Image (cartoon, helix red, strand yellow):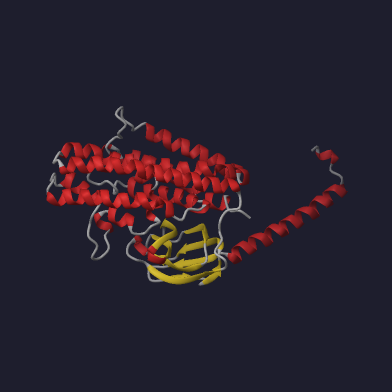
Amino acid sequence: MSARRSTAATLLTLAVATAALAGCSQKKDDKTAADAVKVNATDTACEVSKTTFPAGHVSIDIANKGSKVTEVYVYAAGDKIVTERENIGPGTKATITAEIKAGSYEVACKPGMVGDGIRQKITVTGDGSAAPTDPRLTAAVDSYRKYAQEQADATVPAVEAFAAAIKGGDLEKAKSLYAPSRTGWERAEPVAESFGDVDPKTDTREDGLEPGQEWTGWHKLEKSLWADAVIGDAEKKLADQLVADLKDWQKRIPEAEITATSMANGAKELLDEVATGKVTGEEDRYSHTDLADFAANVEGAKKAYELLKPVAAEKDAELAKTLDSEFAAIQTLLAKYKQADGSYTSYDKVTDAERKTFSDAVNSLGEPLSKLAAAVVVK
């Protein structure tokens, strides 16, 4: 509109309308802030502002006031993960948007990202219904469950082949099958982690063991194959156990709690996995196959985003545009390290400068991805 057509009366009307809208927006923001569950995490405490609140869409505002990197979990019975946020640096804040049903839970803060955490019991009241009313989100959840099942179904035979090589004593073949056996798992890891007892048995690194926990799973075998160059009876037994544990995961996917917000949070969790394990080279420290896991994490995060995109783009077009661009950028970067046989460059061959480039790309995607859950909340 031309400025010449803006009369004094029009300006007055616009000013009043703008003030009214600002007032409504302020009231809405104030209500959202007031409704949020605030968690103050320190090195010795996990302070939760509300220990009772209604079921449904819940905003959890986290402030790390300690000196260590922390993570915050909401656990249901049996340490089943309802929602989580990792890698919250000292002096920083994070917000989780989640759908939580009525019931009893625990909020856990984990300074140093180790141990069972400092825990606070909470009660969520109401009828427990937090299901999305938008049919597009219902379809997205159904499609994501199917995707997770497909990844598990593909993982089991890949792990069986890996285990067969170990049981046959073929060290080099077992090494070649290690990374491919992890692809489906890394794509759908948030669903596996939601069960609470599957991930510790299959994907724990030695420095992540809890007191008294027996070390089993991929990384124990990884150390045997690369660091020790040994395949003995113990490794053969571990290979069989890995197959059994992953078959258990495969069977349990139909019962997994999956919501639109858990999908969005899961996508962010996959990027956190990359930031805290893959980019640093800690995840596959013996085999240096970190980039294969990195790529699978990104693929899984992108799948969740793409299923949620119709709603997210409608509510926040700029966010969707940014996510499209950042996902494309990080996958283009990864493609430079993909070999003709489908494997990736050994991570010990990646320079510090290149690792910094990867880290920057992860951070650039992670920040907007953390806003995806809020963008798909039905109001």
Residue sitting at 31 percent across and 49 percent down? 247
Tell me: 31 left or right of 349. right
| Whether residue 50 is visible | no
Looking at the rendered structure, the number of numbered marks drawn on it comes to 0
The N terminus: image quadrant: top right
Q: Position of residue 119 (x, y in %)?
A: 40, 70
Residue situated in front as seen by the camera: 33 or 264: 264
Q: Residue furthest toward the top?
A: 340
Is 347 rendered above or below residue 123?
above
Write down the quadrant of residue 115 in the picture.
Answer: bottom left
Tell me: 262 left or right of 315. left
The C terminus: image quadrant: bottom right
Q: Position of residue 370 (x, y in %)?
A: 50, 51
| Whether residue 124 is visible | yes
Is 290 rendered above or below residue 256?
above
Residue sitting at 69 percent across and 57 percent down? 25
Q: Position of residue 315 (x, y in %)?
A: 62, 46
Residue sitting at 37 percent across and 41 percent down? 296
Residue sitting at 38 percent across and 57 percent down? 195
Q: Position of residue 63 (x, y in %)?
A: 48, 63
Tell me: 311 left or right of 118. right
